[in-house]
Amino acid sequence: MTPAINDLKKRKISFTLHKYIHDPAHQSYGLEAAEKLNLDPERVLKTLVVQLDNNELGVAIVPVTRQLNMKALAKFFGVKKISMAEGILVEKSTGYVLGGVSPLAQKKRLKTVLDSSAEKYQTIFVSGGRRGLEIELKPTDLLRLTGAATAAVS
């Protein structure tokens, strides 16, 4: 079990696990999950960790089919500039490996935003904390568990 799954169980949150065999040659972890699980890729979300211009880290959760809007995200965080965090910082602050970063039960709680496009679905899919593992849950539960806000950031 991963920290994300353990946290969901501990808090008695309804969720469904979806497993697939990860192909290391696939170019996109999120799109691979959508393809292998036969899901609408707009419902499969990637967890992106960014570094703010004040050196703090933040998290954006966006559909795998979309690109992060850096200007919108910087505005959300109240800074002038952001960049993608280096992999080593991501793994250290979240406790997860790249390609398996879950927005749930991260080592260090970071300010988090969920792209507003996720709100139109009854359930969404996020990484379960390792490659080849997706968690299906309600967007409202994800917001509550992560302390996230919603904004148009993709």
Image (cartoon, grey):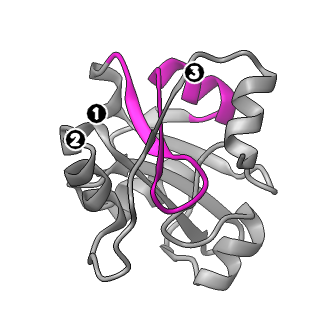
Question: Residue placed at 71% from the left, 62% from the top?
Answer: 94
Q: Quadrant of residue 98?
A: bottom right
Q: For mark 3, does the 10 Å Cα neighbourhood hold few (<14), some (14 to 19), or many (20 or more) residues?
A: some
Question: Residue placed at 43% from the left, 55% from the top?
Answer: 73
Circles 2 and 3, Cβ within 8 Å, touching? The answer is no
Amino acid beneath label 3: Asp
> Which range of residues does the magenta coloring cover?
122-148
Label placed on residue 42: 2
Q: In front here: 110 or 125?
A: 125
Circles 1 and 2, Cβ within 8 Å, touching? The answer is yes
Per the image, the residue denoted by label 3 is 141
Q: Nearer the viewer, mark 1 or mark 2?
A: 2
Dot 1 falls on a residue whose secondary structure is helix
Q: For mark 2, does the 10 Å Cα neighbourhood hold few (<14), some (14 to 19), or many (20 or more) residues?
A: some
Would you say residue 90 is visible in this rendering? yes
Marks 1 and 2, how far apart at CA: 8 Å
Q: Position of residue 16 (x, y in %)?
A: 49, 26
Circles 3 and 1, Cβ within 8 Å, touching? The answer is no
Per the image, the residue denoted by label 1 is 117
* Location of residue 10 with respect to 39 vertically, above or below: above
* Location of residue 153 with respect to 121 vertically, above or below: below
